[in-house]
Amino acid sequence: QIKLLDALRVICDKHGLIYWIDFGTLLGATRHKGFIPWDDDIDVSMPIADYRKFLKIAQSELPEDIFLQTSKTDKNYKQCFSKLCDRNSTFLHDNETGEELYHQGIYMDIFPSVIYPRMPFSLRKILLYFTVRSRANAVISRKNVFINYSIYLVCKFFWLLFSPFKSNNVAQTVEDNGYYYAIPQAYIYPLIELEFEGKLYPAPNKVHEYLSLMYGEYTQTPPVEMRISRAKAILFDMPCKFQRTLNKR
């Protein structure tokens, strides 16, 4: 996975794009100087403008053994963020069989970071709750599609209604923000560098405040029973079914 992160870094450095390690990767860098032992991916965030530029550039500049996974490059991929996937491996989550029709290589997540509108915390949390769940049910799980998609559209209307009132807080897109958080930009910029697996990568400058807002008491490792990996199988030298199909074309 470090290969994936370094591939992203090469492109971002070349084109002056901003990114930072985030979520479990930021927590791992702070607490372990590398991967959380039971974590199974890398997370980075990018400002939405840089994220869009990266998606335009990446397909032509990534190494041949890395696949850029978006809803455009993989029609069965339904998330609102992107992934870089290793073409020569397979990574199965505990709810997957390996027969799914989307890319399942070892991966890293790339999240667009957007400015949130100014609104009361309780309203933001309620809106995020229904936005995340209604879209997931309608688009990913395909449960009660009409009802859930209708709820999602109502939520999007309220986000649009508040959009002129900008705050100083950012987070991943409202469709993916299951933590219901928004981070003050002062916690992020200017970026610093943190060690992760023996290398330095961009990170938010107020790491303690950032992680405390995200996770609460983050310095203590969780009890053993909560150290759970989501991986069912990781095959380092076996391309996933989706990649094998691409290879035949």
Image: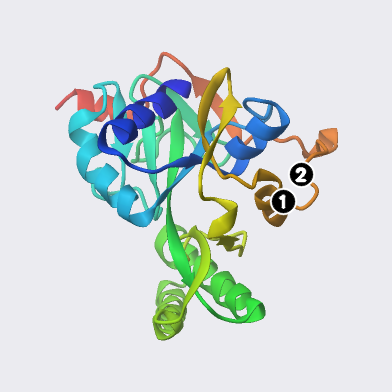
Residue 146, quarter of the rendered image: bottom left
Classify 10 Å Cα crowding around label 2: few (below 14), some (14-19), many (20 and above): some
Residue 63 vs residue 103: left or right?
left
Residue 44 vs residue 178: left or right?
left
Please determine whether, in this image, residue 81 is positioned above or below residue 221.
below
Q: Quadrant of the C terminus?
A: top left
Residue 54 in the image: state x and y as whole percent. Answer: 28, 43
Please determine whether, in this image, residue 86 is positioned above or below residue 182.
above
Q: Nearer the viewer, residue 70 or 19?
A: 19
Classify 10 Å Cα crowding around label 1: few (below 14), some (14-19), many (20 and above): few
Residue 173, quarter of the rendered image: bottom left
Q: Tell me, yes or no, whether the two marked residues, 2 and 1, touch with CB atoms within 8 Å.
A: yes
- Residue lying at 79% horizontally and 39% vertically, measured from the top left: 219
What residue did someone put label 2 on? 218
Helix, strand or loop at label 2? It is loop
What residue did someone put label 1 on? 215
- Mark yes or no: residue 74 visible: no
